[in-house]
Each structure stands twice: as C-alpha cells, then as structure tokens.
Image: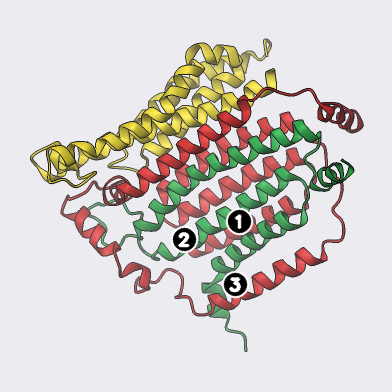
C-alpha cells in the first residue's frame, strides 16, 4: 500500500468531510433525512476506510479496539437510561420525553436527540467491532 | 413519469438478480450484491423513502460488502462446482411464486391515497407534524418518539449481534485437519 | 382477456415476488454457504420492497413536513424498514462469522463436502 499515493492523499482529504457529514446527518435528523442509524454507519465506514488504506494497526491507534468494544453496550445503556427520568420525575411512563423541558416540542426534541445519541454510539461501535473481528482473524 | 422510472429500475433489479443467481465466482457475486443494493436504494428513493434509501446505500452497499469481502478473504473465493440437478428447488420456487402472485390479485392498486394503509395511523402523524408536535421529519419522530420501545429493541438486537460476532471470532484458531484440507483446496484453485 | 392495467399497477409486486423467489431458490439449490447468505439477503430486501411499495402515494412527497405540500407518503413502513436494514447487517455478520468458523474447522464452505466429512467419521 506504500505506493498508492493518490489513494492515501485522497483518503486524508475525504475523511474530515465524511465525519462532519456523519454528525450533520445525526444532528439534522429532525429536519432532513437521516438520524442515529445512518450517522453511526457513516462514522464506522470512515474508520473502515482509514483501516483499509493505512492498515489495521494505524486504525487501532486512532480507535482502540478495547474502547470500541466498550462503546457497544454503552449506547444501549444511554438509550435505556434516557427513559428513566420520566419514571422518577414525571408521570411514571418509561421513555416519556415530557420531563426534558417545559414546552412540548422542545422537550421531545431533547428526548429524541438523547435517544439517537444512544443509537449512534451502538451502531457505529458495533459495525467497527465487527470489522475489527473479521480483520483480526485475517491478519493472525 | 415516476412509475416509468420505477419500472425501469425494477427491471434492472430483476436482471441483476438473475446475474447473482447464475454467477459462480463468489467475488463477482459480492460485487453484484453491491450493485443490487445501490439499485434498490434508488427504487426506495422513488418510493419516497429517503431515510431508508440513505440507510440502504450506506449499509447494504458499504458495510455489508466490506464484511462479505472480509469473510471471502478468510474462506477463499474459489468458484464452487456447479450444483446437481436443481429441479426440486425450481419447482418449490415456482409454486411459491404462483401462490404469491395469486395473492396479489386482491391487493389495492399501487400509489392510491385511499388504500387501507393510509387510513390508520398516518393521518395522525402528518397532523402532529403540521402542529409541531413532532419534528418535521416524521420518520425520526416516529422512530425515536412514538415507537421508542421498538427502537430500543432494535438497538438491543444490534448490540447482541455485535457481541455474538466478537464471541465467535475471538476463539483460538485450532490447527486441525481442517487447515490442511483448506490449504489443499487453495492449491487446487491456484 | 388479460387485464393489462392491473398488471401495470402490480408490476412492483411481481418484481418483489421474483426477488423473493430467487432468494428462496438460492438458499435451497446452492450448496455454498456465503452464496446462501446472499440469497437470504435477496429475500430480505424483497421484504423491504413489499413494505415500502404500499406506503407510496403517487403525487405525494417524502414524509418531511413543509407548508408547501399536503400529500405525504406513509412514514410508518419507512421506520420499520430503516431499523430492519441495520439489524440485517448485524445478523449477516453473525452468519458470516459462523461460516468462517465452519471453514476453519472443515476446510470447506460447501454443504455437500461438509456432509461427506461428517459421514466419514
């Protein structure tokens, strides 16, 4: 891979825009197409691109395998605990976003954003962990 | 016009499917599956499912192609021998297709607004979006708010899948008779 | 007399059924396990189409609210299928991981060869 100058430089140029696009898709999901699922996949795809061009070890220095694998359950935990404040402070209905603000629309937008953060964490880290698992098997 | 575009895309989809069925080189099959994913994403775009099209283009053509190629690297992508007489599978498929086509006769016409699917919950979602009770993108609203329990379940399934892959792939690779046979089959294909 | 109008209206259902049946055929007739998984994928995507096609209204627009539009396609199937796609790739990865382990153990991913090896023992 040392000789593929165009691929390496092109990847370096594309990567920041890929990540910015992923977060745009995540945070703009309320107003346009997109959301946590798509953004998570795009983030994972950008790391996979980095791993394919610069090698698995370089990718693991950027996103260490141990951290990626710990993020997988963390996303589910964020999602599941986003419903708890409604049970403690609200009317006792799980995943009722009314507790996150005084105004209906505002509160629900915060709730949706919180839940989508859980989704993006789990999806991105799961896809990356799957890729690491297969790539590890191949290089061993 | 839209139905014409959709007709062309669907016909291309059928052609790619035939190519996938007939192709025996697994590497070729994986690339054809990528093309298939992009085509079906275009069909979804024409069907107004923009969020789904985005997901299919990134997941179907991106991640699953990468994972399939990684698996091919580990198992060897040699062309597999032609299958034996495939009359029974062909018969089963033809009977299934006949039954399903018979079942479509009573389905409502494509694209009409008075079909039963549009009478149930959809008007409520559109009205709520109009009254700013949920975000303008109704798909996000329904996904994370109205059907939040569903999405929690789906996230848990993805988590379970990831854990499953890690558990299966982490195990120590055993040097058994299998590895000898594998190297032999590699030699044959080379 | 063939009802051409109905065939034109149901064209996407026929293609959906064709994709579904091709997936079924691959799963039954082909012995290679990766090919079988791709066949399952074909079957799965045909189900996506089966859900999405009835949600479309001709003359409607994508379900993103704007004052300029009155008619929207049904957002509910989109939600169901969006999550199904991402779950689909996770389950595909589990299947491929199992195939990789089988290949390491038997040296083959062809069904017939694996059955032969099992019978020899």
Colour assignment, chain B: red
Residues tagged 1 and 3 counted as in contact (Cβ below 8 A): no
Q: Chain of mark 3?
A: B
Q: Is residue B75 visible?
A: yes
**Where residue B126 sits: x, y (%)?**
25, 58
The residue to which callout 1 is attached is C43
Up the image or down, B158 lies above or below C8; here it is: above
**Where residue B104 sits: x, y (%)?**
54, 75
Q: Chain of mark 1?
A: C
Looking at the rendered structure, which numbered label has been put on residue A136?
A: none
The residue furthest bottom is: C1
Q: Is residue A22 visible?
A: no
Residue at the spot 63% in from the left edge and 13% down from the top edge: A5
- How far is mark 1 from mark 3, CA to CA? 14 Å
> Which corner quadrant of the image does residue B186 belong to?
top right
Residue at the spot 53% in from the left edge and 14% down from the top edge: A60
The residue to which callout 3 is attached is B100
**Quarter of the image with the C terminus of chain A in it:** top right
Colour assignment, chain C: green
Compared across the picture, whether C36 is left or right of B49 comes to right
- How far is mark 1 from mark 2, CA to CA? 13 Å
Label 3: how many residues lie within 10 Å, few (<14), some (14-19) or many (20+)?
Answer: some
Secondary element type, mark 2 = helix
The residue to which callout 2 is attached is C51
């Amino acid at each position: 891979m040392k000789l593929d100058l165009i691929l390496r430089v092109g990847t370096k140029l594309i990567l920041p825009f890929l990540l910015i696009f992923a977060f745009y898709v995540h945070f703009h999901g309320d107003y346009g197409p997109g959301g946590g699922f798509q953004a998570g996949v795009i983030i994972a795809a950008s790391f996979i691109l980095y791993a394919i061009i610069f090698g698995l070890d370089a990718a693991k220095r950027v996103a260490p395998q141990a951290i990626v694998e710990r993020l997988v359950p963390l996303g589910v935990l964020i999602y599941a605990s986003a419903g708890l404040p409604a049970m403690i402070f609200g009317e006792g209905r799980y995943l009722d976003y009314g507790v996150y603000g005084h105004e209906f629309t505002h509160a629900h937008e915060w709730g949706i954003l919180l839940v989508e953060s859980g989704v993006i964490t789990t999806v991105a880290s799961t896809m990356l962990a799957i890729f690491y698992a297969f790539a590890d098997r191949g290089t061993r | 016009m839209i139905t014409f575009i959709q007709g062309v895309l669907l016909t291309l989809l059928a052609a790619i499917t035939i190519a996938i069925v007939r192709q025996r080189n697994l590497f070729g099959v994986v690339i054809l599956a990528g093309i298939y994913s992009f085509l079906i994403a275009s069909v979804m775009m024409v069907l107004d499912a923009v969020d789904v099209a985005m997901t299919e283009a990134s997941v179907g053509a991106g991640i699953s192609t990468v994972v399939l190629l990684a698996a091919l690297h580990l198992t060897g992508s040699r062309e597999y021998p032609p299958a034996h007489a495939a009359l029974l599978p062909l018969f089963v498929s033809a009977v299934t297709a006949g039954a399903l086509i018979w079942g479509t006769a009573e389905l409502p016409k494509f694209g009409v607004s008075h079909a039963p699917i549009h009478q149930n919950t959809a008007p409520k979602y559109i009205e709520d979006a109009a009254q700013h009770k949920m975000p303008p993108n109704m798909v996000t609203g329904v996904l994370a708010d109205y059907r939040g329990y569903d999405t929690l379940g789906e996230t848990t399934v993805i988590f379970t899948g990831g854990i499953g892959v890690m558990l299966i792939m982490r195990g120590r690779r055993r040097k058994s008779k299998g590895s000898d046979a594998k190297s032999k089959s590699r030699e044959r294909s080379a | 007399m063939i009802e051409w109008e109905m065939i034109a209206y149901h064209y996407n259902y026929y293609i959906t059924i064709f994709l579904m049946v091709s997936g079924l055929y691959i799963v039954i007739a082909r012995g290679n396990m990766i090919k079988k998984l791709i066949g399952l994928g074909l079957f799965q995507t045909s189900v996506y189409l089966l859900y999405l096609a009835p949600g479309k209204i001709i003359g409607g627009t994508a379900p993103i609210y704007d004052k300029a539009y009155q008619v929207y396609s049904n957002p509910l199937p989109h939600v169901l299928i969006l999550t199904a796609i991402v779950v689909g790739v996770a389950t595909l990865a589990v299947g491929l991981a199992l195939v990789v382990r089988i290949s390491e153990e038997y040296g083959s991913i062809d069904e017939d060869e694996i059955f032969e090896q099992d019978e020899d023992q």
